[in-house]
Image (cartoon, rainbow, N blue to C red):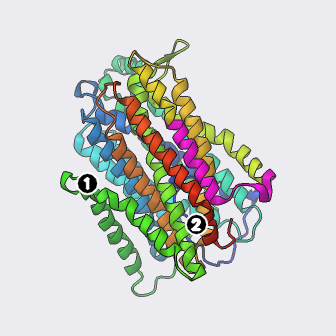
Amino acid sequence: MSSDPRNGPVPIETEIVMPVHPQLLGHPRPLFVLFFAELWERFSYYGMRALLTLYMVAPLAAGGLNLPTSKASLIYGTYTSSVYMLSIPGGTVADTLIGSRLAVLLGGIVIACGHFSMAVPSDATFYLGLVLIVLGTGLLKPNISAMVGQLYAPADTRRDAGFSIFYMGINLGAFVAPVVTGFLAQHSAFKTLLTRWGFDPNHSWHWGFGAAGVGMVLGLIVFVVFGDALKKIGPAPVRPPGAWKKPALAFFGTLGLAAVVWLSDQVAFTWLRWLFILVPIGVMFWFGRSPIAEVRRFGAIFFFFIGAFIFWALFEQAGTSLNLFADRFTATHVGGIEVPSSWYQAANPIFVIVLAPLFALLWTRLGDRQPSSPMKFTLGLFFLALAFSLMIPAAKLAVAGRVSPLWLLGLYFLQTIGEMCLSPVGLSTFTKLSPRHLVGAMLGIWYLGAAFGNKFAGVLAANFGEGNAQNLDRFFGQQSLAVFVIAGLFLALVPWVRRRMGGVR
C-alpha cells in the first residue's frame, strides 16, 4: 500500500517560491501534520472498506443487506473504481479553482459526512454514504499528496525520504483500521457489550462505520489545529476568466466514463468489458510502431498501464473474494483468541511496512544491476499469480471445514512482494517516460488503470459463489493460470518495451 495507486495521484507541481519551514527530524515540520492527517484519513477508508462487502452480503437477521455475492462485488468494484476516477477532476479543481489545502479540508468534511451517514442503519443512508465518500476522497487524495511534494524544492534530496515518511502514515492507518472497525462490527465481545447497553447487537456494523468517521474527524482536527504552516502550501490559484471550464470538462468526462463502466455491468452490455483491455493493447502496439522516438514511448506507457490494470484486478479482491474466504472458510479462533475476518485486511499494510525498506535497500545495493522497469512489472505479476495459486490447495481443504489463517497470510505476503516490484515502479516510470507537458495527463492514465483494476476486481469476485467451497479451487486456479500466462507474455515483451523506452530504466 505504501506506494500503490490507492495513495492518489500527484498533480504536476508548478514553479513556486518555497516557504521556509521549521525543521523536525531533518524535514519540514508540516510534513508530520500531513503524516497524521493522512494516517487518520486512511484509517477511515480502510476501516470502512474492510467491512463493506461483509456487510452487504450478511443476512438481514445479522443486520446486513442480504445482497447476493455477485451484486455486492459489483457494487464494491464500482465504488472503489469511482474513488480513483474522481481523483482526476478532484486534482483539476484544486489546480485551477480552490487550491490543494481547501480541497483537502472540504474533501475530509465530505468523507466524514459519508461515514456518519453509513452509521445510520438504513439502505438510503448506506448508499448516500458511499457517494459522499467517493466525492470527498476524489478531492482529498490527489491533493494531500501534492501538498507533501510542495514542501520540497524539485531538486531537494530529502524529497523521496519525505514521501516515504508520508506513506508510512498511510500504512499505519491501514493496519490499525481493520483491527478497530472489525472489532466493533464483528467481535462477540463488543456485541455482548452492546446488548448490555440496550443496543441491538445486529447493528454493530454501523458502529464500525461510525468509527471510520471518527478517524476522519481526527484527521481533520490535526490538519486544522496544527496546520498553520500549511496555509502557505497549496493556496488558491489565480483564477482567470473561464477557469471553471477545465475542471468541468474533467468532471463530465469522468462521469461519462463512469457511465460506460456502469453500463458494462448490465447483461446486454457486458461485452463492453473487453474494450477496457483490448483498447489499451491496441494503443500500445499502435504507438509502439511509430517512427518517432517520443511517440514510441507511449507504447511503453500503455504496457505499464495494462500490467497495473491486471495486477489490481486480482490484488484488490482483498476486499471482496479474499475477505469472503476469510469470513466463510478461515478459522475464527487462533490460539483461543477470536479473530474477526476483517482483521486479515491488516496483513498487507504490515507486510508493506516490513518489506518496503528491504526492497529499497535491495534496489540500492543492486544499482545498475537491478532489473529494468518492465522486468520488475513482470516479476510483480508472477508473484501475484503465485499468491493466488496458494489458494488452490486452501480452497480444496475448505471443503472439509475452516482452514488455517496461514493460507491467507501467505497469499498476502506474496502479493505484497509483487506490489513492491510493481507499484512504486509504475508511478516513477510514467513520470519519466511522459513528455513534460503531458505528465499530468499521463498520471491520470496511470490512476485510470487502477480504477479499471478495482472495477474488474469486483467483476471477478462476482463469481466467488454464495458459500459453497466446491468450486473455489477452480475460481482461484483460473485467475492464477491467467496471470501466469500474462506474466509470460510480459516477459517476452520486455526487450520490445525497453527499446521503446529510449534508455529510460
- Residue 116 shows in this picture: yes
Q: In which quadrant will I find the C terminus?
A: bottom right
Depicted 223 relative to depicted 62: above or below: below
The magenta stretch spans residue 315: no
Element marked by disc 1? loop
Query: Which residue does the numbered mark 1 point to in the structure image?
Result: 270
Q: Amino acid at mark 1?
A: Thr
- Asked where in the image residue 466 lies, by quadrant, the reply is top left
Q: Provide residue 232's location: percent of width, then percent of height.
A: 62, 69
Q: Residue at x 34, y 24 (%)?
A: 470
Q: Specify few, some or many for label 2: CA neighbours under 10 Å numbering under 14, 14-19, or 20 or more.
A: many
Q: Nearer the viewer, residue 470 or 138?
A: 470
Query: Which residue does the numbered mark 2 point to in the structure image?
Result: 430
The magenta stretch spans residue 368: yes
**Magenta-tinted stretch:** 365-388
| Label 2 vs 1, first from the N-terminus | 1
